[in-house]
Image (cartoon, rainbow, N blue to C red):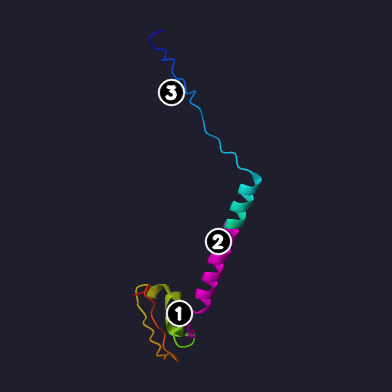
């Protein structure tokens, strides 16, 4: 008898629970609100990616000896430096985030 827990709601784990009951209008409005938010974020990301500038430099033939160097097991500790001169046709500005 001394080992029995007290007869309280906390000790007997009979506490009342709160259950949410959403109506159809609340669920549909949350659904469409989330969709509009995701659509706005997608448009913003698409516009920022479209404004990004990039340059492609093919270095396959220029640095071919560096690519063949690790094929031989005896060259595992040798370093290879490949330098490619290039120029930018227009000025690329650094954004505030990248500084």
What x and y, as percent, mark residue 48? Answer: 50, 74
- Mark 2 nearby-residue class (10 Å; few <14, some 14–19, many ≥20): few
For disc 1, the marked residue is 67
Q: Residue at x 61, y 48 (%)?
A: 26
Asked if the magenta segment contains residue 41, the reply would be yes
Residue situated furthest top in the rendering: 1
Q: Callout 2: helix, strand or loop?
A: helix
The answer to which image quadrant residue 85 occupies is: bottom left
* Nearest the eye: 90 or 38: 38
Majority secondary structure in the magenta region? helix
Lateral position of residue 97 relative to residue 29, left or right? left
Lateral position of residue 95 relative to residue 40, left or right? left
Q: Residue at x 55, y 35 (%)?
A: 19
Q: Nearer the viewer, mark 1 or mark 3?
A: 3
What x and y, as percent, mark residue 32? Answer: 62, 56
For disc 3, the marked residue is 10
Spatial CA distance of label 1 from label 2 is 47 Å
Q: Earlier in the sequence, mark 2 or mark 3?
A: 3
Q: Callout 1: helix, strand or loop?
A: helix
Q: Which residues are magenta?
A: 34-58
Image quadrant holding the N terminus, namely top left
Spatial CA distance of label 2 from label 3 is 42 Å
* Nearest the eye: 84 or 54: 54
Question: Taking 44 as reference, is 25 above or below it?
Answer: above
Q: Residue at x 44, y 90 (%)?
A: 90
* Nearest the eye: 77 or 15: 15
Give the number of marks: 3
Question: Taking 27 as reference, is 40 above or below it?
Answer: below
Circle 2/circle 3 CB separation < 8 Å: no
Asked if the magenta segment contains residue 49, the reply would be yes
């Amino acid at each position: 008898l001394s080992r029995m827990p007290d007869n309280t709601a906390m000790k007997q784990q009979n506490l009342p629970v709160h259950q949410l009951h959403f109506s159809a209008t609340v669920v549909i409005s949350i659904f469409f609100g989330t969709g509009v938010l995701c659509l706005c974020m997608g448009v913003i990301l698409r516009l920022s990616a479209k404004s990004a500038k990039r340059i492609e430099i093919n270095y396959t033939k220029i640095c071919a000896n560096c690519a063949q160097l690790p094929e031989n097991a005896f060259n595992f500790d040798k370093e290879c430096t490949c330098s490619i001169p290039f120029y930018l046709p227009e000025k690329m500005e650094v954004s505030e985030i990248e500084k």
